[in-house]
Image (cartoon, grey):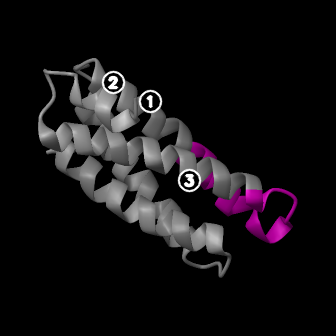
Amino acid sequence: MSLSETVSKINSLSDEQRDCIENCNEAAMVCEWCADECLGDSDMEECARLCRDVADLTSLHARLMARSSNYSSQLAQACADACEECADECENHDADHCQACAEVLRKCADSCRSMAN
């Protein structure tokens, strides 16, 4: 069963929340990949650090949404801000993993921002 299929079985979630969970999980995965690729390059330390922060935040946010936590809307704002900052950093680098990461993070930031409102 795919993540989408699993998330679709959580009846308490709106379609917008389901999309945000999927976006957050995708962001966590792409950030882990990007951070791993950046390791060992002193010019990429900030990118790796931000990616690791976003991976942790988005993963936690997805889990809080899945269980309808009262804290998910506050975390949504932090996720959106972190995704935007990381996307800005990734866009400064030509590496394919950074460009892919930035694209996913823009979508995740938008989705999280709508959960914060």
Specify the amino acid type for callout 1.
Leu
Give the mark toward the camera: 2 or 3. 3
Residue under numbered circle 3: 30
Judged left or right of residue 111, residue 48 is: right
113 lies above or below 103 = above
Specify the amino acid type for callout 3.
Val
Q: Position of residue 56 (x, y in %)?
A: 54, 36
40 lies above or below 2 = below
Q: Position of residue 55 (x, y in %)?
A: 54, 43
Mark 1 and mark 2 residues within 8 Å of each other at the beta carbon: yes
Judged left or right of residue 6, residue 28 is: right
Residue under numbered circle 1: 60
Q: Residues within 10 Å of mark 1 (few under 14, many from 20)?
A: many
* Dominant SS in magenta: helix
Q: Residue 116 shows which numbered tag?
A: none
Q: Residue 64 shows which numbered tag?
A: 2
Marks 3 and 1, Cα distance to the nearest angstrom?
A: 15 Å
Q: Residues within 10 Å of mark 3 (few under 14, many from 20)?
A: many
